[in-house]
């Protein structure tokens, strides 16, 4: 009898641990990982698209990016409570490397069905997953003090029978620690918000300076809080608990996971491949063979996609000075279109991995890959068989839109910059060159550049989807009611919008593009918390510069001439201006001053003369 398929959602901000856990789970035919996430927004979107049978949640969320204390588990607990409120029917299995008793108790009270330490044996973890997925509960015997060890799977003591936690035995120390963690949490939240604002492209210089000052003040305040409210030394019982946790971790490392859990994987994976250690906090838990760049690239791709999905929750207002085709869409339609492109891009990457396309082959196929992505998105967004009745004719919308493929390719798709670099980065982890310096795939610089390239690709493909619609069905009432923003539904506004787009492409072709080539730059469309912004990145474009001709070449010559003449001309103007100012102030100014002084003295003398009288005698008192 075939066992029912268990669909798993992994929630953990440790990318390496997620990779190891997912690779280990793939050997079991009854278990399927439908998604990975590290943020609340990504979790909710995955569950909305594909409900899971079981959620595996790391209670230590936030430790990878936080410098509070290794035992703070508030983020994981809050997410657990949120999921149980919105999806009470989906069981949750908790994992933790250093569980806090109060957090485990609160998670259990909120409805979590199971808990296992990250040092649990692989066989026990597998049992817990299958048991919790069937609606039963499983609380590991290694759970902290607030949960009594159970001799039978799923058994637990009532809350009143549990031993007192350390914080209950020492209320003053618990209050001290709570105040410290609360203050650090508020400071860290403010620091994270300011850091996110500082990363926004196009931020004014004054705002950046103010935010940088606030960031330094918060860092100083954090140091003061750490010094004044330093945590007390742990008591012997805490040390014993920590030793027990370390022994559990060592036991997992020495037993089932490495020897049995990966046994099947090792048959498929060459032992000569390098291995990567999975870390849970400060300890090493398991040895995960990294088979190939394709396997290692999936967590990196998931991370980039998760960050992009999070930004898609923000407003999608156009903050650039140029119109975009998607400006005509309603906000929810923009978001829907970008989600579709992201999903189709993920499918495209999976197909390329399955076909084992090499980087050199990908360079040749790149235009076709981008074109297929556009075709698939257009078909999915409008519907393959979507038909409009115009007069006596029934027109299939997608078929009509795809007739503009050559125009869309030449105007938008083929001009999407560095798309090959993005694909090779996601598929093969080839280093990205940032400001003429290559950065490894997992470095912050490479991740930030890849995120910009990914968002630019999404927005350019979205513009390419809407451009044929504006050419063929711009003023059709059904289209306007279904897709358009209410501010752009009148015929006059639509025609004005189309004319603005036409002028944008003319100026871009003859002025903007040669200027960008001459300045060795690409302009990218990116997403930030305020909307769609534009940013520039450096990239050598010497070959394109040599191929310029006609008006485009003339633009570069004008720019070069201006660069050659402008500094000298400005210097000459500044010199003449300073001379003119000298003449006005030192010569004419002094002369006018002397004349004015004489006039004032004459007026004063005349005033005195009126008092003395015509005969020169003073008036009588």
Image: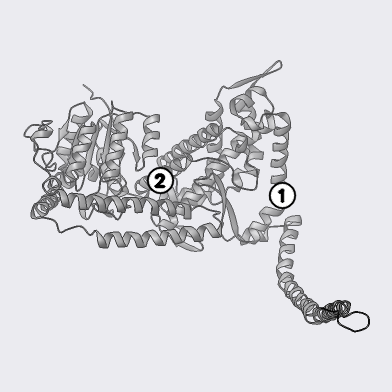
Name the residue located 20 percent from the left edge and 33 percent from the top edge: 109
Q: What element carries label 2?
A: helix
Report the number of discs: 2
Q: Residue 21: in sight, yes or no?
A: yes
Name the residue located 62 percent from the left edge and 35 percent from the top edge: 328
Give the residue number, with chain letter if any, for mark 1: 507
Which badge, 2 or 1, comes first in the chain's sequence? 2
Name the residue located 67 percent from the left edge and 39 percent from the top edge: 407
Q: Residue furthest bottom?
A: 616
Q: Is residue 213 left or right of residue 83?
A: right
Q: Which label sits on residue 301?
A: 2
Q: In this view, does 222 lie above or below 58?
A: below
Please rate how many residues cluster around mark 1, counting C-alpha atoms within 10 Å: few if below 14, some from 14 to 19, many from 20.
few
Cα gap from disc 2 to disc 1, whole angstroms: 35 Å
Quadrant holding the N terminus: top left
Quadrant holding the C terminus: bottom right
């Amino acid at each position: 009898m075939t066992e029912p398929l268990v669909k798993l959602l992994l929630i953990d901000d440790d990318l390496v641990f997620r990779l190891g856990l997912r690779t280990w789970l793939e050997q079991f035919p009854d278990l399927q990982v439908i998604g990975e996430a590290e943020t609340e927004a990504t979790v909710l979107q995955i569950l909305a698209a594909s409900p899971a049978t079981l959620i595996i949640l790391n209670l230590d969320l936030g430790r990878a990016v936080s410098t509070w204390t290794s035992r703070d588990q508030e983020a994981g607990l809050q997410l657990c409570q949120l999921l149980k409120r919105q999806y009470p029917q989906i069981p949750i299995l908790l994992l933790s490397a250093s569980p806090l008793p109060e957090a485990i108790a609160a998670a259990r009270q909120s409805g979590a069905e199971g808990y296992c330490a990250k040092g649990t044996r692989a066989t026990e973890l597998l049992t817990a997953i299958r048991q919790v997925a069937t609606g039963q509960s499983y609380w590991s015997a290694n759970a902290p003090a607030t949960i009594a060890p159970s001799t039978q799977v799923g058994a637990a003591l009532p809350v009143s029978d549990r031993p007192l936690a350390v914080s209950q035995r020492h209320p003053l120390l618990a209050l001290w620690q709570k105040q410290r963690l609360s203050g650090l949490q508020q400071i860290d939240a403010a620091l994270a918000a300011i850091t996110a604002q500082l990363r926004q492209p196009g931020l004014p210089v004054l705002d950046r300076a103010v935010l940088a000052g606030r960031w330094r003040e918060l860092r100083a305040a954090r140091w003061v809080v750490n010094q004044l409210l330093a945590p007390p030394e742990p008591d012997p019982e805490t040390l014993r608990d920590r030793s027990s946790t370390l022994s559990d971790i060592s036991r997992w490392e020495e037993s089932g996971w490495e020897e049995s859990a990966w046994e099947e994987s090792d048959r498929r994976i060459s032992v000569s491949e390098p291995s990567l250690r999975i870390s849970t906090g400060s300890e090493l838990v398991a040895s995960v063979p990294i088979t190939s760049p394709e396997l290692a690239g999936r967590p990196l791709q998931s991370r980039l996609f998760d960050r992009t999905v999070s930004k898609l929750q923000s407003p999608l207002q156009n903050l650039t000075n140029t119109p975009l085709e998607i400006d005509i869409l309603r906000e929810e339609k923009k978001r829907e279109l970008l989600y579709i492109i992201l999903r189709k891009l993920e499918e495209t990457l999976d197909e390329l991995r399955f076909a084992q396309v090499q980087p050199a082959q990908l360079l040749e196929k790149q235009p076709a890959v981008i074109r297929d992505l556009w075709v698939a998105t257009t078909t999915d967004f409008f519907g393959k068989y979507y038909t409009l009745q115009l007069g006596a004719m029934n027109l299939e919308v997608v078929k009509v839109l795809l007739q503009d493929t050559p125009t869309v390719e030449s105007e938008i798709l083929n001009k999407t910059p560095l798309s090959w670099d993005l694909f090779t980065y996601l598929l093969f982890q080839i280093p990205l060159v940032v400001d003429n310096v290559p950065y490894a795939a997992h470095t912050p610089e490479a991740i930030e550049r890849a995120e910009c390239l990914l968002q630019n690709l999404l927005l350019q493909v979205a513009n390419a989807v809407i451009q044929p619609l504006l050419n063929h069905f711009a003023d059709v009432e059904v289209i306007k009611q279904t897709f358009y923003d209410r501010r752009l539904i009148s015929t006059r506004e639509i025609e004005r919008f189309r004319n603005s787009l036409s002028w944008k492409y003319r100026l871009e072709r003859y002025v903007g593009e040669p200027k960008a080539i001459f300045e060795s730059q690409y302009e990218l469309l990116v997403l930030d918390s305020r909307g769609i912004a534009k940013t520039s990145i450096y990239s050598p474009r010497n070959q394109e510069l040599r191929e310029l001709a006609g008006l485009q070449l003339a633009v570069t010559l004008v720019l070069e001439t201006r660069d050659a003449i402008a500094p000298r001309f400005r210097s000459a103007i500044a010199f003449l201006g300073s001379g003119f100012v000298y003449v006005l102030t030192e010569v004419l100014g002094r002369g006018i001053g002397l004349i004015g002084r004489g006039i004032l003295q004459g007026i004063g003398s005349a005033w005195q003369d009126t008092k003395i009288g015509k005969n020169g005698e003073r008036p009588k008192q």
